Image: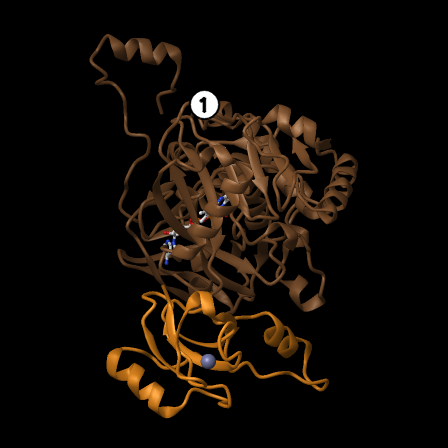
Amino acid sequence: MKRYSAFAIAKEAFRHQLGWERAWRSPEPKPEYEVIIVGAGGHGLATAYYLGKNHGITNIAILEKNWLGGGNTGRNTTIIRSNYLQDASAAIYEKARSLYETLSQDLNYNVMFSPRGVAMLAQTHHEVRGYRRTARANAIQGVETEFIGSEQVKALCPIINVDGPRFPVLGALWQPRGGTARHDAVAWGYARACSDMGMDIIQNCAVTAVRRTGGTVTGVETTRGAVGCRKLGIVVAGHSGVLAAMAGFRLPVESVALQALVSEPVKPCMDIVVMANTVHGYMSQSDKGELVIGGGADGFNNYTQRGSFHHVEETVRALVETFPIISRLRMLRQWAGIVDMTGDRSPILSKTPLENCFINCGWGTGGFKAIPGSGWAMAELMAKGEPGPLAAPFGLDRFREGRFIDESVAAGVAH
Amino acid sequence: MLILTCPCCGAEADETELASGGEAHIQRQGPESTDAAFEAYLFQRKNPSGVHFERWRHAFGCGKWFHAARCTRTLEVFGTYTAQSLKPPKWILDRIRKRRPDWAGPLP
Ligand SMILES: Cc1cc2nc3c(=O)[nH]c(=O)nc-3n(C[C@H](O)[C@H](O)[C@H](O)COP(=O)(O)OP(=O)(O)OC[C@H]3O[C@@H](n4cnc5c(N)ncnc54)[C@H](O)[C@@H]3O)c2cc1C
Ligand SMILES: [Zn+2]
Protein backbone atom coordinates (compact mmCIF):
# COMPACT_ATOMS: atom_id res chain seq x y z
CA MET A 1 0.00 0.00 0.00
CA LYS A 2 1.33 3.42 -0.91
CA ARG A 3 1.12 5.74 2.05
CA TYR A 4 -0.88 8.95 1.83
CA SER A 5 1.25 11.98 2.75
CA ALA A 6 1.93 15.57 1.78
CA PHE A 7 4.90 14.22 -0.16
CA ALA A 8 2.68 11.78 -2.10
CA ILE A 9 0.30 14.61 -3.03
CA ALA A 10 3.18 16.73 -4.29
CA LYS A 11 4.57 13.81 -6.26
CA GLU A 12 1.23 13.04 -7.90
CA ALA A 13 0.78 16.68 -8.82
CA PHE A 14 3.77 16.28 -11.13
CA ARG A 15 2.43 13.20 -12.91
CA HIS A 16 -1.19 14.03 -13.60
CA GLN A 17 -2.45 12.07 -10.55
CA LEU A 18 -1.88 8.80 -12.41
CA GLY A 19 0.04 7.06 -9.62
CA TRP A 20 -2.77 6.65 -7.08
CA GLU A 21 -3.72 3.05 -6.51
CA ARG A 22 -7.12 1.61 -5.58
CA ALA A 23 -7.76 1.93 -1.87
CA TRP A 24 -8.72 -1.76 -1.58
CA ARG A 25 -8.72 -4.82 -3.82
CA SER A 26 -11.93 -6.49 -5.08
CA PRO A 27 -10.95 -10.17 -5.07
CA GLU A 28 -13.01 -13.25 -5.90
CA PRO A 29 -13.95 -15.28 -2.81
CA LYS A 30 -11.57 -18.13 -1.98
CA PRO A 31 -13.02 -21.54 -1.01
CA GLU A 32 -12.00 -21.14 2.62
CA TYR A 33 -10.78 -18.64 5.21
CA GLU A 34 -9.80 -18.85 8.84
CA VAL A 35 -12.34 -16.15 9.73
CA ILE A 36 -15.40 -14.86 7.91
CA ILE A 37 -16.96 -11.59 9.01
CA VAL A 38 -20.47 -11.01 7.67
CA GLY A 39 -21.14 -7.30 7.12
CA ALA A 40 -18.66 -4.65 5.98
CA GLY A 41 -19.99 -1.80 8.09
CA GLY A 42 -17.73 0.01 10.50
CA HIS A 43 -18.04 -2.66 13.20
CA GLY A 44 -17.30 -5.59 10.85
CA LEU A 45 -14.32 -3.85 9.24
CA ALA A 46 -12.93 -2.72 12.60
CA THR A 47 -13.27 -6.27 13.93
CA ALA A 48 -11.23 -7.58 10.99
CA TYR A 49 -8.68 -4.79 11.34
CA TYR A 50 -7.97 -5.48 15.03
CA LEU A 51 -7.95 -9.25 14.42
CA GLY A 52 -5.04 -8.54 12.10
CA LYS A 53 -3.36 -5.79 14.04
CA ASN A 54 -3.74 -7.06 17.62
CA HIS A 55 -3.95 -10.83 17.10
CA GLY A 56 -2.04 -11.52 13.87
CA ILE A 57 -5.01 -13.18 12.13
CA THR A 58 -5.18 -12.01 8.51
CA ASN A 59 -6.69 -14.97 6.63
CA ILE A 60 -10.04 -13.20 6.73
CA ALA A 61 -12.92 -12.53 4.33
CA ILE A 62 -15.39 -9.74 5.00
CA LEU A 63 -18.58 -10.50 3.08
CA GLU A 64 -20.89 -7.59 2.27
CA LYS A 65 -24.34 -7.78 0.72
CA ASN A 66 -24.21 -4.33 -0.90
CA TRP A 67 -21.30 -1.91 -0.88
CA LEU A 68 -19.03 -1.44 2.13
CA GLY A 69 -20.14 1.24 4.54
CA GLY A 70 -23.56 1.50 2.84
CA GLY A 71 -25.53 0.37 5.91
CA ASN A 72 -25.96 2.41 9.07
CA THR A 73 -22.30 3.37 9.04
CA GLY A 74 -22.88 5.52 5.96
CA ARG A 75 -26.27 6.77 7.16
CA ASN A 76 -25.60 8.05 10.64
CA THR A 77 -25.18 11.54 12.03
CA THR A 78 -21.64 10.78 13.28
CA ILE A 79 -21.87 11.92 16.88
CA ILE A 80 -19.03 10.59 19.02
CA ARG A 81 -19.25 10.75 22.80
CA SER A 82 -18.66 8.49 25.80
CA ASN A 83 -20.57 10.21 28.60
CA TYR A 84 -22.52 7.12 29.64
CA LEU A 85 -23.69 6.33 33.14
CA GLN A 86 -22.92 2.63 33.56
CA ASP A 87 -19.31 1.49 33.96
CA ALA A 88 -19.53 -1.15 31.23
CA SER A 89 -20.75 1.37 28.66
CA ALA A 90 -18.36 4.12 29.67
CA ALA A 91 -15.45 1.68 29.33
CA ILE A 92 -16.16 0.51 25.78
CA TYR A 93 -17.37 3.88 24.42
CA GLU A 94 -14.43 5.71 25.98
CA LYS A 95 -12.03 3.14 24.54
CA ALA A 96 -13.61 3.86 21.15
CA ARG A 97 -13.47 7.63 21.59
CA SER A 98 -9.84 7.53 22.58
CA LEU A 99 -8.98 5.31 19.60
CA TYR A 100 -10.77 7.84 17.35
CA GLU A 101 -8.31 10.51 18.50
CA THR A 102 -5.43 8.82 16.70
CA LEU A 103 -7.36 6.78 14.13
CA SER A 104 -6.31 8.91 11.15
CA GLN A 105 -2.63 8.36 11.99
CA ASP A 106 -3.17 4.69 12.78
CA LEU A 107 -4.97 3.98 9.48
CA ASN A 108 -3.01 6.54 7.42
CA TYR A 109 -6.44 7.75 6.32
CA ASN A 110 -8.05 11.03 7.31
CA VAL A 111 -11.24 10.14 9.17
CA MET A 112 -11.72 13.84 10.01
CA PHE A 113 -12.23 13.23 13.72
CA SER A 114 -13.29 16.58 15.09
CA PRO A 115 -13.39 16.75 18.91
CA ARG A 116 -15.51 19.87 18.83
CA GLY A 117 -17.43 19.05 22.01
CA VAL A 118 -20.88 17.59 22.65
CA ALA A 119 -23.49 19.32 24.80
CA MET A 120 -26.47 17.31 26.01
CA LEU A 121 -29.04 19.86 27.07
CA ALA A 122 -30.85 19.50 30.37
CA GLN A 123 -34.34 20.90 29.87
CA THR A 124 -36.15 19.47 32.86
CA HIS A 125 -35.15 19.26 36.51
CA HIS A 126 -35.11 15.53 36.16
CA GLU A 127 -32.50 15.83 33.42
CA VAL A 128 -30.43 18.23 35.51
CA ARG A 129 -30.29 15.63 38.29
CA GLY A 130 -29.59 12.83 35.82
CA TYR A 131 -26.73 14.63 34.09
CA ARG A 132 -25.15 15.79 37.36
CA ARG A 133 -25.15 12.17 38.39
CA THR A 134 -23.63 11.12 35.05
CA ALA A 135 -20.92 13.79 35.36
CA ARG A 136 -19.95 12.36 38.76
CA ALA A 137 -19.99 8.80 37.45
CA ASN A 138 -17.83 9.91 34.51
CA ALA A 139 -15.32 11.53 36.89
CA ILE A 140 -14.87 8.16 38.59
CA GLN A 141 -14.72 6.31 35.26
CA GLY A 142 -12.03 8.66 33.91
CA VAL A 143 -14.27 10.17 31.24
CA GLU A 144 -13.86 13.94 31.04
CA THR A 145 -17.30 15.56 31.33
CA GLU A 146 -18.75 18.46 33.24
CA PHE A 147 -22.19 19.82 34.09
CA ILE A 148 -22.39 23.41 32.84
CA GLY A 149 -24.99 26.15 33.39
CA SER A 150 -27.22 27.72 30.78
CA GLU A 151 -25.01 30.86 30.40
CA GLN A 152 -22.14 28.59 29.43
CA VAL A 153 -24.39 26.75 26.96
CA LYS A 154 -25.33 30.07 25.38
CA ALA A 155 -21.66 31.08 25.18
CA LEU A 156 -20.71 27.79 23.50
CA CYS A 157 -23.59 27.87 21.04
CA PRO A 158 -25.14 31.33 20.65
CA ILE A 159 -27.90 30.15 18.28
CA ILE A 160 -29.60 28.17 21.05
CA ASN A 161 -32.71 29.67 22.55
CA VAL A 162 -32.11 29.03 26.24
CA ASP A 163 -35.39 30.68 27.35
CA GLY A 164 -37.76 28.50 25.35
CA PRO A 165 -41.39 28.67 26.42
CA ARG A 166 -41.85 24.94 27.04
CA PHE A 167 -38.43 23.65 27.98
CA PRO A 168 -35.91 26.37 28.90
CA VAL A 169 -32.29 25.19 28.88
CA LEU A 170 -31.26 24.68 32.51
CA GLY A 171 -27.74 23.45 31.77
CA ALA A 172 -25.95 20.72 29.89
CA LEU A 173 -23.71 17.72 30.22
CA TRP A 174 -20.64 18.88 28.35
CA GLN A 175 -18.05 16.50 26.92
CA PRO A 176 -15.34 18.71 25.42
CA ARG A 177 -13.55 15.83 23.68
CA GLY A 178 -16.62 14.36 22.04
CA GLY A 179 -17.45 15.42 18.52
CA THR A 180 -17.87 13.99 15.04
CA ALA A 181 -15.92 12.13 12.36
CA ARG A 182 -16.49 11.52 8.66
CA HIS A 183 -18.57 8.31 8.53
CA ASP A 184 -17.56 7.07 5.05
CA ALA A 185 -13.91 7.72 5.79
CA VAL A 186 -14.07 5.51 8.88
CA ALA A 187 -15.35 2.59 6.78
CA TRP A 188 -12.98 3.34 3.90
CA GLY A 189 -9.95 3.79 6.14
CA TYR A 190 -10.51 0.46 7.88
CA ALA A 191 -11.24 -1.23 4.53
CA ARG A 192 -8.01 0.04 3.01
CA ALA A 193 -5.99 -1.10 6.01
CA CYS A 194 -7.67 -4.54 6.03
CA SER A 195 -7.07 -5.03 2.32
CA ASP A 196 -3.44 -4.02 2.84
CA MET A 197 -3.04 -6.77 5.45
CA GLY A 198 -4.17 -9.28 2.81
CA MET A 199 -7.79 -9.63 3.88
CA ASP A 200 -10.46 -10.06 1.19
CA ILE A 201 -13.36 -7.60 1.24
CA ILE A 202 -16.02 -9.08 -1.00
CA GLN A 203 -18.85 -6.72 -1.88
CA ASN A 204 -22.16 -7.60 -3.59
CA CYS A 205 -21.98 -10.91 -1.77
CA ALA A 206 -25.00 -11.62 0.44
CA VAL A 207 -24.82 -14.46 2.93
CA THR A 208 -27.91 -16.63 2.37
CA ALA A 209 -27.30 -19.58 4.73
CA VAL A 210 -24.99 -20.67 7.52
CA ARG A 211 -23.55 -24.17 7.11
CA ARG A 212 -23.08 -26.16 10.27
CA THR A 213 -22.51 -29.67 11.51
CA GLY A 214 -23.87 -30.15 14.99
CA GLY A 215 -23.01 -27.08 17.01
CA THR A 216 -20.17 -25.95 14.76
CA VAL A 217 -20.19 -23.58 11.81
CA THR A 218 -18.33 -24.88 8.75
CA GLY A 219 -18.98 -21.96 6.42
CA VAL A 220 -21.63 -19.89 4.69
CA GLU A 221 -23.53 -19.95 1.44
CA THR A 222 -23.58 -16.71 -0.47
CA THR A 223 -24.87 -15.24 -3.70
CA ARG A 224 -21.33 -15.82 -4.98
CA GLY A 225 -21.00 -19.45 -3.89
CA ALA A 226 -20.16 -21.34 -0.72
CA VAL A 227 -17.24 -20.17 1.44
CA GLY A 228 -15.78 -22.22 4.29
CA CYS A 229 -14.43 -20.86 7.57
CA ARG A 230 -13.16 -21.92 10.98
CA LYS A 231 -14.70 -18.95 12.80
CA LEU A 232 -17.72 -16.83 11.89
CA GLY A 233 -18.44 -13.28 13.06
CA ILE A 234 -21.92 -11.85 12.45
CA VAL A 235 -21.81 -8.04 12.37
CA VAL A 236 -24.87 -6.95 10.39
CA ALA A 237 -26.71 -4.44 12.63
CA GLY A 238 -30.37 -4.29 11.54
CA HIS A 239 -30.16 -7.67 9.83
CA SER A 240 -28.85 -9.53 12.89
CA GLY A 241 -32.15 -11.32 13.39
CA VAL A 242 -32.06 -12.58 9.81
CA LEU A 243 -28.51 -13.94 10.16
CA ALA A 244 -29.28 -15.44 13.57
CA ALA A 245 -32.25 -17.26 12.03
CA MET A 246 -29.89 -18.68 9.37
CA ALA A 247 -27.62 -19.89 12.16
CA GLY A 248 -30.56 -21.37 14.07
CA PHE A 249 -30.82 -19.13 17.12
CA ARG A 250 -32.92 -16.16 18.16
CA LEU A 251 -31.87 -12.75 19.51
CA PRO A 252 -33.36 -10.22 21.90
CA VAL A 253 -33.38 -7.74 19.02
CA GLU A 254 -36.01 -5.88 16.98
CA SER A 255 -35.24 -3.86 13.85
CA VAL A 256 -36.72 -0.43 13.26
CA ALA A 257 -36.04 2.46 10.89
CA LEU A 258 -34.22 5.49 12.29
CA GLN A 259 -34.18 8.70 10.27
CA ALA A 260 -31.86 11.64 9.72
CA LEU A 261 -32.01 14.71 7.53
CA VAL A 262 -29.76 17.56 6.41
CA SER A 263 -30.53 21.16 5.60
CA GLU A 264 -29.27 23.22 2.70
CA PRO A 265 -25.69 24.38 3.37
CA VAL A 266 -25.27 27.65 5.25
CA LYS A 267 -22.32 29.61 6.64
CA PRO A 268 -20.80 28.33 9.89
CA CYS A 269 -23.30 28.91 12.68
CA MET A 270 -22.52 26.26 15.30
CA ASP A 271 -19.21 24.59 16.08
CA ILE A 272 -20.31 22.05 18.68
CA VAL A 273 -22.77 19.14 18.68
CA VAL A 274 -26.00 19.82 20.55
CA MET A 275 -28.39 17.12 21.71
CA ALA A 276 -31.80 18.00 23.14
CA ASN A 277 -33.19 14.77 24.46
CA THR A 278 -36.35 16.10 26.08
CA VAL A 279 -37.72 17.52 22.83
CA HIS A 280 -36.04 14.74 20.80
CA GLY A 281 -33.76 16.50 18.41
CA TYR A 282 -30.09 17.08 17.90
CA MET A 283 -27.94 18.93 15.48
CA SER A 284 -24.40 19.65 14.31
CA GLN A 285 -22.97 21.40 11.26
CA SER A 286 -21.03 19.48 8.65
CA ASP A 287 -17.90 20.73 6.97
CA LYS A 288 -20.02 21.44 3.89
CA GLY A 289 -22.26 23.72 5.96
CA GLU A 290 -25.32 21.48 6.09
CA LEU A 291 -27.03 21.15 9.43
CA VAL A 292 -27.05 17.44 10.23
CA ILE A 293 -30.19 16.53 12.11
CA GLY A 294 -31.07 13.28 13.81
CA GLY A 295 -34.67 12.21 13.69
CA GLY A 296 -36.89 9.72 15.40
CA ALA A 297 -37.24 5.97 15.15
CA ASP A 298 -40.38 4.24 13.96
CA GLY A 299 -42.29 2.43 16.65
CA PHE A 300 -42.67 -0.78 14.66
CA ASN A 301 -40.50 -3.41 12.97
CA ASN A 302 -39.31 -2.18 9.62
CA TYR A 303 -36.66 -3.18 7.10
CA THR A 304 -37.46 -0.55 4.44
CA GLN A 305 -34.75 2.09 5.12
CA ARG A 306 -37.40 4.79 4.65
CA GLY A 307 -39.07 5.81 7.87
CA SER A 308 -42.30 7.72 8.40
CA PHE A 309 -42.90 11.32 7.49
CA HIS A 310 -44.46 12.40 10.76
CA HIS A 311 -41.13 11.81 12.53
CA VAL A 312 -39.52 14.42 10.31
CA GLU A 313 -42.20 16.85 11.33
CA GLU A 314 -41.73 16.10 15.04
CA THR A 315 -37.97 16.44 14.82
CA VAL A 316 -38.05 19.71 12.94
CA ARG A 317 -40.64 21.10 15.31
CA ALA A 318 -38.40 20.30 18.29
CA LEU A 319 -35.37 21.87 16.66
CA VAL A 320 -37.11 25.07 15.64
CA GLU A 321 -38.09 25.48 19.27
CA THR A 322 -34.47 25.04 20.39
CA PHE A 323 -32.84 26.88 17.46
CA PRO A 324 -35.40 29.47 16.20
CA ILE A 325 -32.83 30.73 13.67
CA ILE A 326 -33.33 27.62 11.50
CA SER A 327 -37.07 28.09 11.00
CA ARG A 328 -36.75 29.24 7.39
CA LEU A 329 -34.08 26.75 6.29
CA ARG A 330 -34.98 24.21 3.66
CA MET A 331 -34.24 20.55 4.22
CA LEU A 332 -32.23 18.90 1.48
CA ARG A 333 -32.37 15.16 2.01
CA GLN A 334 -33.91 12.63 4.37
CA TRP A 335 -33.05 8.95 4.75
CA ALA A 336 -33.22 6.06 7.22
CA GLY A 337 -31.16 3.13 8.42
CA ILE A 338 -32.35 -0.11 9.98
CA VAL A 339 -31.23 -0.13 13.58
CA ASP A 340 -31.09 -3.13 15.88
CA MET A 341 -32.72 -2.46 19.25
CA THR A 342 -32.02 -4.90 22.09
CA GLY A 343 -34.18 -5.61 25.13
CA ASP A 344 -32.10 -3.32 27.36
CA ARG A 345 -30.99 -0.96 24.55
CA SER A 346 -27.33 -1.88 25.12
CA PRO A 347 -25.19 -3.69 22.54
CA ILE A 348 -24.39 -7.38 22.29
CA LEU A 349 -20.81 -8.68 21.88
CA SER A 350 -21.16 -12.34 22.51
CA LYS A 351 -20.57 -15.99 22.00
CA THR A 352 -23.58 -17.77 20.53
CA PRO A 353 -25.10 -21.25 20.89
CA LEU A 354 -22.72 -22.31 18.06
CA GLU A 355 -19.22 -22.82 19.39
CA ASN A 356 -17.25 -21.00 16.67
CA CYS A 357 -19.81 -18.30 15.86
CA PHE A 358 -19.74 -14.85 17.46
CA ILE A 359 -22.10 -11.92 17.20
CA ASN A 360 -21.70 -8.16 17.48
CA CYS A 361 -24.97 -6.22 17.24
CA GLY A 362 -27.52 -4.18 19.11
CA TRP A 363 -25.69 -0.86 18.74
CA GLY A 364 -29.04 0.48 17.68
CA THR A 365 -29.24 4.22 17.32
CA GLY A 366 -25.77 4.95 18.66
CA GLY A 367 -22.99 2.69 17.47
CA PHE A 368 -20.95 4.87 15.14
CA LYS A 369 -19.12 6.33 18.12
CA ALA A 370 -18.28 2.81 19.27
CA ILE A 371 -16.74 1.44 16.08
CA PRO A 372 -13.05 1.30 17.09
CA GLY A 373 -13.75 0.05 20.63
CA SER A 374 -16.28 -2.50 19.45
CA GLY A 375 -13.92 -3.82 16.77
CA TRP A 376 -11.14 -4.02 19.37
CA ALA A 377 -13.29 -5.99 21.83
CA MET A 378 -14.89 -8.20 19.16
CA ALA A 379 -11.46 -9.10 17.73
CA GLU A 380 -10.32 -10.20 21.18
CA LEU A 381 -13.47 -12.27 21.64
CA MET A 382 -13.05 -13.97 18.27
CA ALA A 383 -9.31 -14.55 18.57
CA LYS A 384 -9.42 -16.03 22.10
CA GLY A 385 -12.92 -17.51 22.01
CA GLU A 386 -13.65 -15.75 25.31
CA PRO A 387 -14.58 -12.10 25.89
CA GLY A 388 -12.02 -9.71 27.35
CA PRO A 389 -12.93 -7.11 30.01
CA LEU A 390 -14.51 -4.69 27.50
CA ALA A 391 -16.87 -7.25 25.94
CA ALA A 392 -17.64 -9.43 28.96
CA PRO A 393 -20.60 -7.41 30.33
CA PHE A 394 -22.26 -7.39 26.88
CA GLY A 395 -22.85 -11.15 26.50
CA LEU A 396 -26.21 -12.61 25.50
CA ASP A 397 -26.37 -14.41 28.86
CA ARG A 398 -27.27 -11.13 30.55
CA PHE A 399 -30.85 -11.46 29.32
CA ARG A 400 -31.23 -14.84 31.01
CA GLU A 401 -29.59 -13.58 34.20
CA GLY A 402 -31.42 -10.26 34.32
CA ARG A 403 -28.06 -8.47 34.40
CA PHE A 404 -29.12 -5.57 32.16
CA ILE A 405 -27.02 -2.58 31.23
CA ASP A 406 -29.63 0.09 31.60
CA GLU A 407 -28.72 3.09 29.49
CA SER A 408 -32.16 3.27 27.92
CA VAL A 409 -32.62 6.92 28.76
CA ALA A 410 -30.22 7.53 25.90
CA ALA A 411 -31.98 5.49 23.23
CA GLY A 412 -34.85 6.08 20.85
CA VAL A 413 -33.43 8.92 18.81
CA ALA A 414 -30.32 8.84 16.71
CA HIS A 415 -27.18 9.86 18.55
CA MET B 1 -47.39 5.96 5.96
CA LEU B 2 -48.64 2.73 7.45
CA ILE B 3 -52.44 2.37 7.39
CA LEU B 4 -54.30 -0.43 9.19
CA THR B 5 -58.04 -1.04 9.33
CA CYS B 6 -59.11 -1.48 12.93
CA PRO B 7 -61.26 -4.65 13.10
CA CYS B 8 -62.93 -3.37 16.26
CA CYS B 9 -64.41 -0.11 14.98
CA GLY B 10 -63.76 -0.42 11.24
CA ALA B 11 -61.80 2.84 10.98
CA GLU B 12 -58.88 3.13 8.57
CA ALA B 13 -56.23 4.36 10.94
CA ASP B 14 -52.82 5.73 9.99
CA GLU B 15 -49.81 5.10 12.18
CA THR B 16 -50.10 8.37 14.11
CA GLU B 17 -53.39 7.02 15.47
CA LEU B 18 -51.97 3.60 16.37
CA ALA B 19 -49.57 2.19 18.94
CA SER B 20 -47.48 -0.83 18.06
CA GLY B 21 -47.59 -3.64 20.59
CA GLY B 22 -44.81 -5.73 19.04
CA GLU B 23 -44.74 -9.41 18.12
CA ALA B 24 -48.04 -11.26 18.38
CA HIS B 25 -48.96 -14.70 19.72
CA ILE B 26 -46.22 -14.85 22.35
CA GLN B 27 -47.15 -17.47 24.93
CA ARG B 28 -46.79 -16.26 28.49
CA GLN B 29 -44.59 -18.51 30.64
CA GLY B 30 -45.70 -19.41 34.13
CA PRO B 31 -43.83 -20.22 37.36
CA GLU B 32 -43.21 -23.81 36.21
CA SER B 33 -41.28 -22.76 33.10
CA THR B 34 -37.54 -23.15 32.59
CA ASP B 35 -35.18 -20.15 32.65
CA ALA B 36 -34.62 -20.57 28.91
CA ALA B 37 -38.35 -20.51 28.16
CA PHE B 38 -38.83 -17.45 30.36
CA GLU B 39 -35.93 -15.64 28.68
CA ALA B 40 -37.40 -16.43 25.27
CA TYR B 41 -40.81 -15.20 26.37
CA LEU B 42 -39.43 -11.92 27.74
CA PHE B 43 -36.78 -11.04 25.18
CA GLN B 44 -36.20 -13.24 22.16
CA ARG B 45 -38.04 -12.00 19.08
CA LYS B 46 -38.59 -13.38 15.59
CA ASN B 47 -37.98 -9.97 14.03
CA PRO B 48 -38.43 -11.32 10.49
CA SER B 49 -37.57 -9.46 7.32
CA GLY B 50 -40.85 -10.31 5.57
CA VAL B 51 -44.23 -11.54 6.82
CA HIS B 52 -44.82 -10.62 10.46
CA PHE B 53 -47.74 -10.93 12.90
CA GLU B 54 -48.12 -8.11 15.37
CA ARG B 55 -50.30 -6.63 18.08
CA TRP B 56 -51.53 -3.09 17.59
CA ARG B 57 -53.75 -0.75 19.57
CA HIS B 58 -56.08 1.80 18.06
CA ALA B 59 -54.74 4.22 20.67
CA PHE B 60 -56.24 7.49 19.45
CA GLY B 61 -59.42 5.87 18.16
CA CYS B 62 -61.57 3.24 19.81
CA GLY B 63 -58.67 2.33 22.12
CA LYS B 64 -58.91 -1.40 21.48
CA TRP B 65 -56.23 -4.00 20.75
CA PHE B 66 -56.11 -6.06 17.55
CA HIS B 67 -53.75 -8.14 15.43
CA ALA B 68 -52.20 -7.32 12.05
CA ALA B 69 -50.32 -9.34 9.43
CA ARG B 70 -47.82 -7.20 7.59
CA CYS B 71 -44.61 -7.41 5.57
CA THR B 72 -41.74 -5.61 7.29
CA ARG B 73 -39.76 -5.44 4.05
CA THR B 74 -42.39 -3.76 1.86
CA LEU B 75 -44.91 -2.45 4.43
CA GLU B 76 -47.64 -4.38 2.54
CA VAL B 77 -50.56 -5.11 4.86
CA PHE B 78 -52.20 -8.52 4.50
CA GLY B 79 -55.00 -7.83 6.91
CA THR B 80 -56.07 -7.29 10.51
CA TYR B 81 -57.87 -9.69 12.82
CA THR B 82 -59.31 -9.77 16.29
CA ALA B 83 -57.22 -9.70 19.45
CA GLN B 84 -59.04 -12.83 20.61
CA SER B 85 -56.87 -15.14 18.46
CA LEU B 86 -54.13 -17.38 19.82
CA LYS B 87 -52.67 -17.83 16.34
CA PRO B 88 -53.17 -16.29 12.90
CA PRO B 89 -56.55 -17.43 11.49
CA LYS B 90 -56.62 -19.65 8.40
CA TRP B 91 -58.17 -17.01 6.15
CA ILE B 92 -55.25 -14.67 6.68
CA LEU B 93 -52.66 -17.42 6.15
CA ASP B 94 -54.44 -18.32 2.88
CA ARG B 95 -54.42 -14.71 1.79
CA ILE B 96 -50.68 -14.36 2.49
CA ARG B 97 -49.91 -17.62 0.64
CA LYS B 98 -51.88 -16.41 -2.36
CA ARG B 99 -49.88 -13.19 -2.54
CA ARG B 100 -46.54 -14.79 -1.52
CA PRO B 101 -46.51 -18.33 -3.01
CA ASP B 102 -42.92 -18.93 -1.81
CA TRP B 103 -43.66 -17.99 1.82
CA ALA B 104 -42.63 -20.79 4.21
CA GLY B 105 -45.38 -20.06 6.74
CA PRO B 106 -45.23 -18.47 10.21
CA LEU B 107 -41.92 -18.94 12.04
CA PRO B 108 -42.25 -21.60 14.77
C1 LIG C 1 -30.13 7.85 10.96
C2 LIG C 1 -29.11 7.29 11.89
C3 LIG C 1 -28.38 8.15 12.70
C4 LIG C 1 -27.41 7.64 13.57
N1 LIG C 1 -26.68 8.53 14.29
C5 LIG C 1 -25.66 8.07 15.06
C6 LIG C 1 -24.79 9.00 15.72
O1 LIG C 1 -24.94 10.22 15.63
N2 LIG C 1 -23.78 8.50 16.50
C7 LIG C 1 -23.60 7.16 16.65
O2 LIG C 1 -22.69 6.78 17.38
N3 LIG C 1 -24.39 6.27 16.01
C8 LIG C 1 -25.41 6.69 15.21
N4 LIG C 1 -26.22 5.79 14.56
C9 LIG C 1 -26.00 4.34 14.75
C10 LIG C 1 -24.86 3.82 13.90
O3 LIG C 1 -25.05 4.22 12.57
C11 LIG C 1 -24.82 2.30 13.95
O4 LIG C 1 -24.88 1.82 15.28
C12 LIG C 1 -23.53 1.76 13.34
O5 LIG C 1 -23.22 2.42 12.15
C13 LIG C 1 -23.66 0.28 13.09
O6 LIG C 1 -22.56 -0.16 12.35
P1 LIG C 1 -22.48 -1.65 11.87
O7 LIG C 1 -21.17 -1.83 11.20
O8 LIG C 1 -22.83 -2.54 12.99
O9 LIG C 1 -23.71 -1.77 10.85
P2 LIG C 1 -23.86 -1.36 9.31
O10 LIG C 1 -23.04 -0.18 8.96
O11 LIG C 1 -25.33 -1.29 9.05
O12 LIG C 1 -23.22 -2.60 8.57
C14 LIG C 1 -23.84 -3.86 8.48
C15 LIG C 1 -23.61 -4.38 7.09
O13 LIG C 1 -24.06 -5.73 7.01
C16 LIG C 1 -24.52 -5.94 5.70
N5 LIG C 1 -25.38 -7.13 5.63
C17 LIG C 1 -26.63 -7.30 6.10
N6 LIG C 1 -27.11 -8.52 5.80
C18 LIG C 1 -26.11 -9.16 5.14
C19 LIG C 1 -25.99 -10.46 4.56
N7 LIG C 1 -26.99 -11.35 4.59
N8 LIG C 1 -24.83 -10.77 3.94
C20 LIG C 1 -23.80 -9.89 3.87
N9 LIG C 1 -23.87 -8.65 4.40
C21 LIG C 1 -25.01 -8.29 5.03
C22 LIG C 1 -25.25 -4.65 5.37
O14 LIG C 1 -25.38 -4.48 3.98
C23 LIG C 1 -24.37 -3.60 6.03
O15 LIG C 1 -23.46 -3.00 5.15
C24 LIG C 1 -27.20 6.25 13.66
C25 LIG C 1 -27.93 5.38 12.86
C26 LIG C 1 -28.87 5.89 11.97
C27 LIG C 1 -29.64 4.94 11.09
ZN1 LIG D 1 -60.66 1.05 16.39
Q: Say which amino acid is labelled 1.
A: Pro
Would residue A375 be visible to someone looking at this image? Answer: no
Name the spot of residue A140 as percent of width and height, x first: 79, 37
Left or right: where B101 falls relative to B56:
left
Left or right: where A37 falls relative to A66:
right
Residue B76, placed above or below residue B104: above
- Quadrant, the N terminus of chain A: top left
Residue A360, placed above or below residue A191: below
Residue at image point 38% right, 55% down: A309
Some atom of ligand 1 lies within 8 Å of the CB belonging to the residue at label 1? no
Given residues A80 and A100, the one toward you in this image is A80
State the hue of chain A: brown
State the hue of chain B: orange
Name the spot of residue A178 as percent of width and height, x first: 60, 31
Residue at image point 62% right, 83% down: B28
Given residues A353 and B26, the one toward you in this image is B26
Would residue A52 be visible to someone looking at this image? Answer: yes
- Quadrant, the C terminus of chain A: top right
Name the spot of residue A318 as percent of width and height, x first: 52, 46
Name the spot of residue B103 as percent of width and height, x first: 31, 78
Given residues A215 and A41, the one toward you in this image is A41
Given residues A338 and A318, the one toward you in this image is A318
Host chain of mark 1: A
Which quarter of the figure has residue A73? top left
Residue at image point 39% right, 83% down: B10
Q: Residues within 10 Å of mark 1 (few under 14, many from 20)?
A: few
Q: Secondary structure at mark 1?
A: loop
Residue at image point 55% right, 33% down: A273
Q: Which residue is mark 1?
A: A268
